[in-house]
Image (tube, helix red, strand yellow):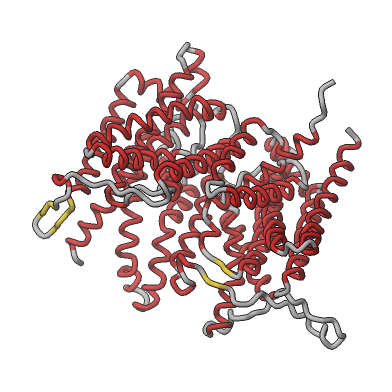
Amino acid sequence: MNGVPTLHRIGGGLVLLLILFTPFVMLWLGKPFWLDIFTRLVILAIAASSLSLLLSVAGLASFGHAAYIGLGAYAVGIPVYYETYGGADWLASYSGWWHVLLGVTVCALFALVTGAISLRTKGVHFIMITMAFSQMILYLLVALEEFGGDDGLSVDLRSEFVVPGAQVLGIPALNMEEPWVFYLVCFAMLLLVLFIVAKLRHSHFGRVLQAAKQNELRVKALGINPYRYRLLAFVVAGIFAGLSGILFANYAYFVSPSMVEWTRSGELMFMVILGGVSTLFGPVVGASVFVLLEHFLSRFTVFWHLPFGILLLVVVLFGRGGIIGMLKREPKT
Amino acid sequence: MDWTLVLTQAINGLQLGILLFLLSAGLTLTFGIMDLINLAHASFFMLGAFICAWATLYFDSFVVGIVCAILGTALLALIVEKTVISHLYVRDHLDQLLATFGLILIADTAVHLIWGPAGLAIPLPSQLQGQVRFGELVVPTYRLVIIGVGLLIAATLYWLVNKTRAGMLIRAGASNRQMLSTLGINVKLLFTSVFILGAVLAGLGGLLIAPITEASIGMGNDIIITAFVVIIIGGIGSIKGAFVAALLIGFIDTFGRAFLDTIFALFMSVDSAETAAPAVSAILVYLLMALILVWRPQGLFPPKLR
């Protein structure tokens, strides 16, 4: 069993390398649209990884994770809208730094407030209340007529990340409009999120969360109140999902309330479960399989949700541990 | 204040509340008794509407449509319970959530395959198309029918759960499942029956609203979330709680949408009231749920502890 963690790390590294290089190989083979698909894949992998911090580490089945993607996306959409069409000078900007600051702050605050309320509840109540808060964001965005209501907003320009002084030193500014530059930015973000999640899992913080998931009473008996740890995990996961939302708005040049529909949260959960809950790279594998399947199936038929639904049923009913779990399972001797 | 408008909105609120009750009655039972989160409840809502629409058009009779829809949803519920749901009772909530989400995807696509991407309208018989006058108040007959049928079903359900042997088993199941099976009750049969009962109620809700909104793919996917809010506010497993909470939410949602701008205008400028009101009224229901959960985490009428 000693070899398993290293094996897992090597496998995870291979998956990441495969994700990093495939679109460039395809670009070289004359199939540039793969870059687009893989950008989406990486962004969703960030969101799924952030959800796995709650699902697998803390054992909190949050069913409203799409809300943070929406909040992050609108933290790009609204400033860009005002900068392009005028109004609300204090908010308007093309600056990516401002978008990140805004998105992270809003997501952290929303996670703090809703988490503080939701974490008072358990089990079914927790699932439903997180979903309800996400619906709140959905209907709020639909009700905001100024930002397109139901139809959403188009984002005319991608976030600009200008490092002060960099031009003077001769370092060129990051051109996010260039698809492969944007892809590398997304990939770097995925690496950062995975790194932090991996560190958190093995920290005191992560251990407390995992212990509280297994036996809350014992953790309390040790004089630790799991509530605060869970709330912090909730906020961290919210911030990461917000970052993926910021990237998504840039990717799609578009934000809309449909990003917050509860079915999106369900899809994120599916990715985490599909890849395997208890591993670091599970969500990445899950998001990859999800996006690629979606791509291939939707090319064959408009009814691609049908095989998707069946796959979901099969994974839940028979495939405990997801794809990585199945690979890891040792044959019985 | 325009009292005719208030009364009209009250009737709309009552109608929404009744509809929510039909959906949440089944949810709260499956939740309370089987400890099952069933998102696919939304699909039975949709299937009831579609089967009714199809049969109404095919046999040219709304009544036949209703009978077909009830039998159809019951049969489908039986099949789904036996093949998928019965394996989920022992699983955790996350698995149940995902598996029933899968069922929604399957049901939505199946409806798309069978009836095409567009919705189906249900033509009402001429007797139900008119309007009823109460002085200045004019109400479409069909809305009164929905309210009447809904109240009738609520009363029947109350009788069934509180006065019959089957209801006694249901209540016993909600408070202590293990004890029930120890006493030699066929729990499997009870679970299947409760699941079918819930699905048929959801289907009834769908077919009742379909003549107004028409049957469309995914029509239950939004209202199911509100139904979950209802059962959480009402207390999971309590029919009475579901009824009270459904009406409460029906009224609050409808009145919020209709009058919040007028109320806001009392203490802020008309302009800002008109911007703020739609946003606040859209989330009023969820605010209410958050407040109630802070105050009473188990909901308003939690069933007696197991």
Seen in the picture, residue B205 relative to A158 is either above or below; the reply is above
Pinpoint residue A309: horizontal percent, then vertical percent: 56, 41
Of the pair B301 and B7, the residue shown nearer to us = B7
Pinpoint residue A91: horizontal percent, then vertical percent: 58, 79
Name the residue rendered at 76%, 64% in the picture: A30
Q: Looking at this rendering, what residue extends furthest in the front direction?
A: A30
Name the residue rendered at 66%, 52% in the picture: A291
Name the residue rendered at 34%, 60% in the picture: B256
Of the pair A221 and B259, the residue shown nearer to us = B259
Q: Looking at this rendering, what residue extends furthest in the bottom direction?
A: A168
Q: Looking at this rendering, what residue extends furthest in the top direction?
A: B184
Seen in the picture, residue B274 relative to A25 is either above or below; the reply is below
Q: Is residue B243 in view from this perspective? A: no
| Quadrant where the image shows the C terminus of chain A | top right
| Quadrant where the image shows the N terminus of chain A | top right
Seen in the picture, residue A249 relative to A196 is either above or below; the reply is below
Name the residue rendered at 29%, 43% in the picture: B208
Pinpoint residue B304: horizontal percent, then vertical percent: 44, 30
- On the rendered structure, is B1 left or right of B203? left
Seen in the picture, residue B151 relative to A81 is either above or below; the reply is above
Pinpoint residue A215: horizontal percent, then vertical percent: 70, 35
